[in-house]
Image: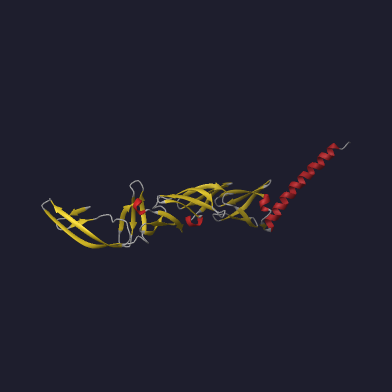
Amino acid sequence: MARYDGAWVYASFIMPNGEPGILLLTVWMWDNATRWFAGSLAIERISGAGALLIGVETAADIAYIKTKVDTITTKLSDLDAKIVAIKDGVAVIDTKLGTMTATLSAINATLTQLIVGTKGDILAKIDTAVGTITAKFSDLDAKITKVSGDLVTISTKIGDVTTTLGDIKAKVVAIDGSVATINTDVGVIKGTVSKIDGTTATIKTDAGDMKVKLDELSRVTVGVPLFIYVITALSLIAAIFAIIAVVMIHRRMPA
């Protein structure tokens, strides 16, 4: 593209992709086909290594790249870009120009599902304009924002996902008094044991109420107050059944 202000001609062009180096730029200009000018100068094609990919338009096949010198545009397909990692919420991308970085929003990242990794850990599957990748929740600033029974909602920088407590390996690891500590693949949850109904205990957390089986609590380090509460509750249940049994036996005895 070019424009003329009466004294100077201003022009811009998209630098072809390739290895960094010195290139020869030759320019030809015509004025109403009556006058012409030609000139050449050396320009430097810089490496893309360390550049920041600040945006993409997939439909238009355009990538916007911020370098140490300026912001340039190029064809996304010419970059042969591929996401290779996510570190602390930043995407690392391999291209023909070198390794670039980008924010997750710049490459249209979307959390699509949860998958089990090779080590048995839960990973987030992420689709982007430059490929699909899996990432740890710690790299997405993930937080548990809602708990309802066995379901849990996880919020990240690129969206929310709903799964089960079992999927994120929620486990009550300690109870001190009535305060429960629950470890998950996403992080630690603190809650209060608020109710015991039969074989199920309800733990109230800031994100909502979760339910666990009493047999799970029996394998946990339990503080005295809750331990006494559980034992008392179980003792009362046993006492009630004992009383019922005595009454039934008494009714069956002959007068």
162 and 50: which is toward the camera = 50
Residue 155: horizontal and vertical position, in percent?
49, 51
Residue at the (35%, 54%) spot, across then down: 79
Residue at the (59%, 51%) spot, across then down: 204
Tell me how the rendering is colored: secondary structure
Say whether residue 29 is left or right of residue 43.
Answer: left
187 and 223: which is toward the camera = 187
Say whether residue 61 is left or right of residue 217.
Answer: left
Residue farthest to the left, as pictured: 34
Residue 193: horizontal and vertical position, in percent?
63, 52
Q: Quadrant of residue 174?
A: bottom right
Residue farthest to the right, as pictured: 255
Report the label total: 0
105 and 58: which is toward the camera = 58
Residue 50: horizontal and vertical position, in percent?
37, 61
Residue 75: horizontal and vertical position, in percent?
32, 51
Establish if 39 lies above or below 240: below
Say whether residue 224 is left or right of residue 20.
Answer: right
Query: Dividing the image into 4 quarters, which one contains the C terminus?
Result: top right
Residue at the (63%, 50%) spot, across then down: 194
Say whether residue 172 is left or right of residue 17.
Answer: right
